[in-house]
Image (spheres, grey):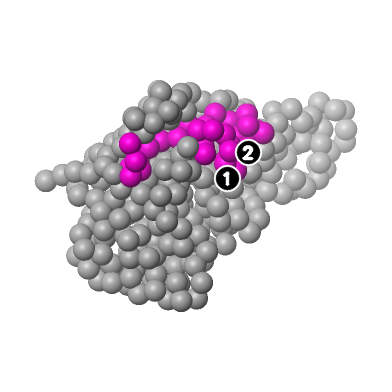
Amino acid sequence: MTTFTAPTIPNIENNELRQQLQQIIDQKTKPLGALGRLETLAVQLGMIQGTLTPHINQPQIRVFAADHGLTKHGTSAYPSAVPAQMVYNFLQGGAAINVLARQHNIELKVVDAGVDADFANSPFKDHAQLLDYKVRHGSRDALTEPAMSAAECLAALENGMKVVENMAGNLLIVGEMGIGNTSAASLLLARLGDTPINDCIGRGTGLDDAGLQHKTSILTQVLARHSEAKAPFDVLAALGGLEIAMMAGALIQAASERRILLIDGFIASSALLAAERLAPGVVQYAIFAHHSVEPGHAHLLKLLNAEPLLNMGMRLGEGSGAALAYPLLQSACAIINEMASFNDAGISGQNS
């Protein structure tokens, strides 16, 4: 029997450390709580890293790309050729995530998790930013069989872990490119989160009303087809996608190494939900970047007890919302490490 054995996820909770971090923040030259979410963010970063002086070094973005067999049923407004074309765009530096990664000096690499293309015979075969962890050429058609066999799902999880092993830095953003992956994310939310499928489904790449109705019909049938899949691993294999499974593995490995997880939108959050169910404790390391306009994301955020930093009306994926929120984490670290206390500045504080 194929099973996944998750690494141990360290528990970050430490009441003494939390109180010390809060005391440092409260003694800064400002009224109590005046920096709002920036203060709680600084405390969260300190807790994740187990230190009074949180810092970020060499932040990393890994964009996981794959195709989805379910798209043959017209669940997306875009053709299945797009993931391969977008991988080329990433490697040429032309996508939104490339722009944001350059702006914020975040290292970006693209992971071929299961794109239905042969990059080994392309001009980009030796590109430094392309990582080949392909499990198969796209997931299977989940309407007729599991999206991944148990062996394929296990390989995707383990490959995701390998992507993170020996990776530089202490912060990870997982992004994705996969036409049809809002369907997979919706299916995972419905089953793992016990959420009505109608509440999970959005327009994805831009479906019209008829397209949305058709997508809902197909996904309802997929859930019925795999009604026996209940355990987290079985659900991920039956309903997920290669890039989502690989993202889940990457998040699990990163949490086991006490890295900061800066979580993007709907797809990344669905990978986090799968990771948390497979390896409880992963979510302790997650900072939620933004609130996607995909309807299912609100339900995912509630399930994960998450309060995202931004609400920009975005739904691009790629890790773009997380890259946009990244400077807030830098600011939180700077405030706790560099801002003077009342005592440092010789200013009478609130308790003086």
Residue 116 falls in which quadrant of the image? Answer: top left
Residue 190 falls in which quadrant of the image? Answer: bottom left
Residue 117 lies within the magenta run: yes
Q: Three-letter amino acid code at disc 2? A: Leu
Callout 2–callout 1 Cβ contact below 8 Å: yes
Residue drawn at x 56%, y 56% as measured from the top left:
315
Q: Alpha carbon of mark 2 to alpha carbon of mark 1: how far? A: 7 Å
**Residues shaded magenta:** 89-118
Q: Three-letter amino acid code at disc 1? A: Ser
> 280 or 202: nearer the eye?
202
User: Which label sits on residue 100?
Assistant: 2
Asked which secondary structure carries label 1, the reply is helix
Residue 138 on image: x %, y %: 30, 48
Mark 2 or mark 1, which has the lower sequence index? 2
User: Which label sits on residue 148?
Assistant: none
Residue 38 visible in the displayed image: yes
**Structural crowding at the residue carrying mark 2, measured as other residues with C-alpha within 10 Å and reported as few (<14), some (14–19) or many (≥20):** some
Residue 345 falls in which quadrant of the image? Answer: top right
User: Which label sits on residue 320?
Assistant: 1
Compared with residue 70, is residue 211 higher up or lower down, i.e. above or below?
below
Asked which secondary structure carries label 2, the reply is helix
Residue 219 lies within the magenta run: no
Residue drawn at x 39%, y 53% as measured from the top left:
80
Residue 6 visible in the displayed image: no
> 34 or 115: nearer the eye?
115
